[in-house]
Image (cartoon, grey):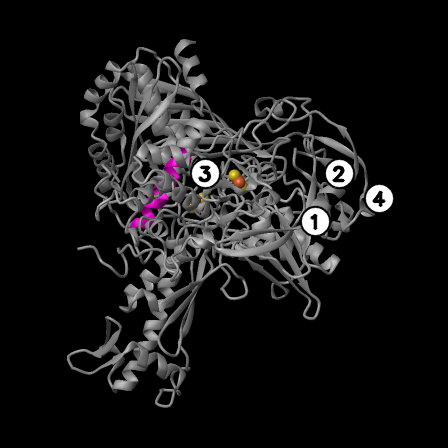
Amino acid sequence: MSEIEMKVNGKSVKGDAEGRTLLSSFLREELRLTGTHVGCDTSQCGACVVHVDGVAVKSCTMLAADAAGADVTTIEGMANADGSLSVIQAAFQEHHGLQCGFCTPGMVMSAAALLKENPKPSEAEIRHYLEGNICRCTGYHNIVKSVLAASGQLDESGGAIAAE
Amino acid sequence: MPKDNGIGAAPKRREDLRFLTGKGRYTDDINIAGQAHAYFLRSDVAHGTINSIDTAAAAGMDGVVSILTAADFEAAGGIPCGWCVTDRHGQPMKEPKHPILAEGKVRHVGDPIAMIIADTLEQARDAAEAINVDITELPAVVDMSTALDAGATKVHDEFDDNLCYDWTFGSDDAAVEEAFSKAAHITTLELVNNRLVANPMEPRVAVGDYTSHNDESTLYTTSQNPHVIRLLMGAFVLGIPEHKLRVVAPDVGGGFGAKIYHYAEEAACTLAAKLCGRPVKWTSSRSEAFMSDAHGRDHITKMELALDADNNFIGIRTDTLANMGAYLSTFAPSIPTYLHGTLMAGNYKTPVVQVNVKSIFTTTVPVDAYRGAGRPEATFQLERIVDMAARELGVSPIDLRNQNFISKDMFPYATPVAVEYDTGDYHATLAKGADLADVAGFDARAAASAANGKLRGLGVAHFIEACGIAPSALVGQLGARAGLYESATVRVNATGGLVVMTGSHSHGQGHETTFPQVVAEMIGIDESMVEIVHGDTANTPMGMGTYGSRSLAVGGSAIVRATEKIINKAKKIAAHLMEAAEGDIELKDGTFSVAGTDKSIAWGDVALTAYVPHNYPLEDLEPGLEETAFYDPANFTYPAGAYICEVEVDPDTGKVDVLNFTAADDFGNVVNPMIVAGQVHGGIVQGIGQALLENCSYDENGQLLSASFMDYTMPRADDIPFMTVDHSCVTPCTHNPLGVKGCGEAGAIGSPPAVVNAVLDALHRGGHNVPHIDMPLTPSRVWSAMNG
Ligand code: FES
Ligand code: FES
């Protein structure tokens, strides 16, 4: 066990980690930030995606020790400063982009990373980018729609999409 | 103008606020002070005799609290099965004991042998490695087609063979012989309905807790039905009465059937917490989930369809081998029988239908309900064979369906397989689907694809399902060991707000949003005044939970009944306050008024009076405003719909791309169209997964080959197009107060045959006369079929 320090959602935090402790476990168990989820053990599902120094990372594939000193953002840090939902979060609610909510933190974090890289992604680009995030509930339809909406590409009636 | 409140509106989901901000509270988010962690040592062989388990070295390791084996559970019962099927000779099925931890033998890869409890999960895992288990391996039983052969290795030594039951249903042999002897054409289809893993994204978790001061056990678990778990575990496994056992299923990350059943780990953690004097937490890894969550489907079927010279369906006979796995999971025996055989008439007026099923024990993970449960298997074979017959006869699959559909003037319609459909209009749903999918324009699109070197195909399927599970008296006759009603308590607080406590459970379905719409509509108040409580046996009435698309049809009906009682009592109070006759009281927009006068009193004032009964008819009426209702449905509900899929096949690689998917469903009345559409989207994609990608496979030694997301292919965002879903065709259910039918499973039921029919249509258009390909239609299977 050794103590590591990092910045999480804008706050400096410290906690104990073994050499083998994953960043996902460190966030969930040590910091009790349970919004980051673990859905697999083969880095396939993306439920654990967080941002490390601004880059989307599957936190189950990174050792906590390797994130020491980094600036980490989790789903708990995504809302606006006044507590209201950010544009992406609000779009997921507006377009029913989540059902059970288990994949949602990872989806939102991945979508946020995509829109930072590519503010107006096409449907195909969204689908391709989210390929590493599995959702078993929504069939992705409303997730893709949510991301289109968050990037300002849907009108009020969902008009940019041919079929709904 | 769409409504913005009540039934038919699409308010944004309330649950989303916590899920979108990381504030959901799933079982794995629960950490109780002092908790220890459990790890299960599981069999890595499919079948074997346990000679010894040496835990001595492991027990002394750092942090180890306790190591439990079967001997520690001697006083406990086995995991019970909730359904007893009676075979064709009137005998009950064979029902082997399902021990919490393996007793004497292991029977599938993943069968738990020992439970290691330690301060940390890492310590428990390390200790598991130090346990020495001596097993003499026995031959695996994997292939159902040889499992019944004389001399086959037996999964359960106490039985004569591996047959759980041999069951027949529907028309008798003489009727079937006669129908087939008169046939002008017989189509025969042999198929495998592939074994699937439900894979909700949240793996299962169980946290057991015990408080000695009141001798109370609490289990936090990822369950679709906490009351059922409390009953099964308390009464049959651990011998804890309900008043000393609380089961909590908080936010649950998807279920799809896999979280219905009572699992060994739940009982083990509950008991271990008492034995160790510490809370005990177990979290499944995904690899562990693949070998311990109940699997789904896994049928081998031969079906025959007899048609007369005018292409009328005159007889159906189907024979299925259904895999039960090593032990009987909670609902397992009912899936290939009562949830499969009863749907074999489909949407058609075929007068003779016979269903035969042999259920078989194998050395594999138990198989039970997965989204649709039996109904997808029935729909798949039926909608495949109808397409096959159309191709053989050279008629349009749409015309052949329309010709044989039960028409809307034939309802209620009693099928030859015991159920009576109340309403439907299958011609309307198929016409709607064909219109939305622009079937008329398909040839032009196919020509465009051909110009690009691709084969385009169109596949149609029309499903029916029985859901709103289920009338208790009927299922009792069929062998269910439980009732299948649902419950609700509606509590009006003193200042007028309402809390609805439901026995159903939401794990993605959005009950916290939908159920208030129903109550708000009835009273005429804003939905924000209604709160839903679910998931905790301590504060909800006994209910059977959520599966079988039952929550709104059965649970919602219970809410309606309880709310009706509330309204009736509130009217009495209002009549007293306004000094009017009760019969003259009207409730509209949350206000009681006296008919024909301008007297009125607000909802909140009546509620307050119920709790501050200073001016109150105390001699006639109790104070308070809280009512409970239990609703037992009179029949199943029968949603139906047309599913139309358009694919492109790459003839060079066999790769299938789904280009368009259209669903035109009749769900009866719809409370929240946004949520209904979401349910259909999700179901369709699970069905596309079954048709094209997913396959759970074992090798001949019983090793699970698909034990992670690397080997078991789940649909990803880029495998799927936008879908067109419609539920504007409405024939309301006649026997529940909301007229609703249920929408949770439809997508997964209707889509697999539509996809397969589309691929075969594409091949046919490309000159490849391939009658059938078994799912999943991977590129290699499709390419081999084209080039074979
Ligand atoms: S938990 Fe990290 S990818 Fe699945
Ligand atoms: S919302 Fe349940 S897994 Fe995506």
- Measuring from the top left, give residue B202's x and y in whole percent: 52, 46
Co-location on one chain, circles 2 and 1: no
- Evaluate whether residue B346 shows in this view: no
Q: Earlier in the sequence, mark 4 or mark 2?
A: 4
> Residue type at mark 1?
Met
- Can you identify the residue that label 4 sits on? B56
- Evaluate whether residue B595 shows in this view: yes
Q: Main secondary structure of the magenta part?
A: helix
Q: CA distance from mark 4 to mark 3?
A: 42 Å
State whether residue A126 is above or below residue A68.
Answer: above
Residue extent of the magenta highlight: B674-687
What chain letter is assigned to the residue under label 1?
A
- Measuring from the top left, give residue B141's x and y in whole percent: 64, 26
- SS under mark 1: loop
Front residue (pair B749, B300): B749
Co-location on one chain, circles 4 and 2: yes
Which label sits in the foreground, 4 or 3? Answer: 3
Picture quarter with the C terminus of chain A: top left
Image quadrant, ligand 2: top left
**What is the number of the mark on residue B129?**
2
- SS under mark 4: helix
Q: Is B684 in the magenta?
A: yes
Front residue (pair B89, A98): A98
- Measuring from the top left, give residue B266's x and y in whole percent: 63, 51
Dot 3 beta carbon under 8 Å from ligand 2: yes
**What is the number of the mark on residue A134?**
3
Which label sits in the foreground, 2 or 1? Answer: 1
Please name the residue shown 50% across and 52% down the image: A35
